[in-house]
Structure formats: structure tokens, C-alpha cells
Image (tube, rainbow, N blue to C red):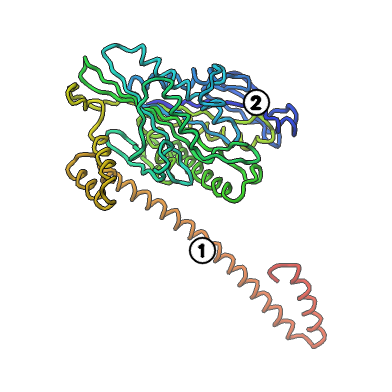
Amino acid sequence: MSNVTVCVRFRPLSSKEKRDLGDNICIQSMDSETFIIKDEKEEGFTFSFDKVFYEESNQADVYEFLVLPIVRDTVNSINGTIITYGQTGAGKTYSMEGPNILESDEKKKGILPRVVDGLFACIKTSADSTKYTVKLSMVEIYMEKVRDLFDLSKDNIQIKESKTQGIVLSGATEISLSDIAEALQSLSSGIANRAIGETQMNMASSRSHCVYMFTLNQESISEKRVKSGKLILVDLAGSEKVEKTGAEGRVLEEAKTINKSLSALGNVINALTCGSPAKANHIPYRDSKLTRMLQDALGGNSRTALLCCCSPSPSNASESLSTLRFGARAKHIKTSPLVIKVSEEKCSKKNGDASGTRDESFEKILEKMSERLNDEDIKLLEELFIQAGLFVDPDSEEDLESAIQDVVQQTISSLMKAVEELRSTVEMLQRENNAMKGRLAVAERCDALPGKNADFLQKIFGFLSSFIPGM
């Protein structure tokens, strides 16, 4: 078991922040792991993480501490995930991509181009008896739909679970990469298709969660087996406050969906860290596409790192505090990274099938046949393949049980909310009933008095009842 590695990065002040509040910042550095942040009321909060990158830190520092160890693990067939998290405009995409994925300035290069360099550098220094293949997929989660950034016609990719591969994206385009230049060019074309928009806090705000997936297969001729490692990089869309971003129309709907999925991610983190160690509690991975896709990274077979990106400005102190509290909770998550063995069969030069799995082969068959057959025929073929054991049924008994648990949990939550609303309604009706009884009692006493006194008291009562509720 290993804990999620959590680092924090504070970007430099923006021109708007400097214009509004000068050079004032809300953080005080203690050392490379600890700092104090003050909220709007000047109350200080102390946080400690695996590493803190302050405004003067550079891109290489982040990569070498947070990412490079996971890249090396991937080459050794251990799955890895790197996630950037924070409010909109906090520097997540800059940390992930740099100013441009094709940036030639070594100091400005982001995590992604450095990962590409690192993967191919590790492959180059590996043993001659090992053959590597690198594949890349890119998708975005936009308005709760998974879209293929290499093929925009695939705008609703399904997330499935395989017993051997974990979480997989059914039908997502995979591009084989032969060198660094080809990898960077492929990343550039995928990024160009990503949904972005303008807000008052960010001229090019990401309107989707972007996921980059590198799959590294290594075929060992001496050991007669194939191993696989998967490296996933996730550039999350930023959390937004509408009063600050000025979002409206379509951008507002995007913001609502982004915030909802980030809230679901927070719920998963809470469930993973707040439950009793002796009792397995329900983890709501299926509440959003984002949490479902990150299921392996957060609670399964992966070495995971989180980069929390923050603004140092007092004007964004509340959002930065929220990000830091999220990171502090995530630090307690434990994962179980293991070496993935795809196949132990003898490598066959004749048919060359050792570099892939049967699941992938039959997915390709279905994809080819879909060009000539209708949807019903394809669905029937898929069911026949599953029945014959040709690939794993994503809707297996385990998946069905998990789905049932999700429905039960959601139903219980809805019922509890309905009971609470009913209780509030009953209490309100009881208060109104008591007030009515009081008014009737006063009216009866007034009627029992002589004429003029009764009229006078009723006027006084009417006057006071307009100021005092319940009379």
C-alpha cells in the first residue's frame, strides 16, 4: 500500500491581482513542505504536503519530484496517474502542458512533453532483449460525456471495467507512437480539439476535464511474457464561482457540470478517507464519469500523484483554502500499485499476437464490422462474444452488484432528504396551527367584553399582529 503523493504549486500573481491588491499575498512559507495561509478574516491555517512549489519554482522542479518517479514505474509495468486540481485560472493547464505542447524552451516545458521525453529516454536505456510499444489515447469529459479528441465523431465513449485491465474506454482511438516528435504532434492535434471558453478569470478556460493515456507494453524475449504499464495524466477543469467568472448561457451550464463532477470527486475522496478501516464502506465512483474513470487511480492498482494549483492572492484565499483542504484529504488515500502481466504465453513471431490482448482484438473486429452492420447486429455479436468468453463482460455480476449498491445508496439519500423536508413542513404547520389557536382565543375574549372595549382591543390586536408573528 502507498499513499497518494500530494504537492502544492502557487503560481505568480496575475496582472489583475496586482492591479487590485498590489503585491500582497496570503501565504507565508515555513519550509519546502509547510506554509501558512490566511483567509479573508486574516485567520491563519497551517498546511504540510510532500512538497510545496512557490512562485519562483520552475517546471523542471515539479516534473522531477512529482512525475519522474511515476514515469519510471510505468516503464516497469506499474500503473501511474498524475492529476492537476484547483480553481479556474490557478495554473493547472500551464503546469500540465506549458505555454504550448510544442514549446522548445526547456524552462517552460510542462509535465506532458517532459513525460514523453522521460518515457522514450527510459526505453532507450532498457535492455536489448525487451521490445517496447507506446500507444496514446486522449479524451475529454465535457458536459458528462466522454469525447475522443482524436476522432470527434466518437462523442459518447462508454467507460467499462475489465477484470484484467481495470477501467477501460471502449472504442477510444489509440495512436501508436514511434518517437518523441510523433508523440508531441499527436498531443498537439488532440489538444486543439479540446473545449475551451473565455471567462473573467481566464481568457482560455478549460471547459472539460482532459485525460491523456499512455499505454506501454513491454515484450521480454528472455522471459517469454508481455507486461503492460499505463500512465494517465488528468488536467481537471477548474472549480468556478459564478460571481467571479461572470459565466452565463452555455458557459454557465458548463460551469455547473464542472462543479458537480468535482463535487462527486470530493465525495469519493471523503468516502475513501473517512470510513472505518475494519468495515468496507460504499465508494460512489459511479456518481460521475470523472470518478468512474479515476476509480483505479484513487482506490485501485495505481501509483497516484496530485498537484494542487493555487493563487497566492488574498482575493482568492477562500478558493485556495478549499483546494488545500481537498489535497490534505487526498493525502490519506492508500493505493496498491502492482506489476501488470498481460500474458505469460510464449511470444510468437509468426502471428505477432503477444503485444495485445484478446479483448483489444475483438473490439477491433466489432469496430470494423460496425461499418457494414447495423447497431442491433453489432450488439448481438458483442453478446455472443461475451457468452463465448472472448472478452470480459463489462456488466458482470460484480459490476451489477456495484451498480445495485449505488442505486440503494442514492435511494437512501433521497429518502432521508424527503423525510427531512417532511419534518420541516410538519413543524411549520404546527407553528401556524398554534398561532391560529392563539388568535382565536384572543378573539373569543374580545367578544366577551362590552362593545366599545371589544372594538378597541380588536384594533390593538390587529395592529400588534402585523409586527409580532404568531399573534
Q: Secondary structure at mark 2?
A: loop
Depth order, front residue of 70/414: 70
Query: Is residue 115 among what the camera can see?
Result: yes
Residue 293, how many percent across, how many down? 40, 38
Amino acid under label 1?
Leu
Image mark for residue 12:
2
Depth order, front residue of 467/323: 323
Specify few, some or many for label 1: CA neighbours under 10 Å numbering under 14, 14-19, or 20 or more.
few
Q: Residue at x 55, y 49 (%)?
A: 253
On screen, residue 442 versus residue 192, left or right, reads right
Residue 221, how many percent across, how many down? 22, 16
Depth order, front residue of 5/313: 313
Query: Is residue 8 among what the camera can see?
Result: no
Vertical placement of residue 84 versus 389, above or below:
above
> Could you tell me if the residues under marks 1 and 2 are in contact, i.e. CB atoms within 8 Å?
no
Image mark for residue 96:
none
Vertical placement of residue 213 versus 208, above or below:
above
Image mark for residue 422:
1
Q: Secondary structure at mark 1?
A: helix
Q: Nearer the viewer, mark 1 or mark 2?
A: 2
On screen, residue 370 versus residue 149, left or right, reads left
- CA–CA distance in space, label 1 to label 2: 50 Å
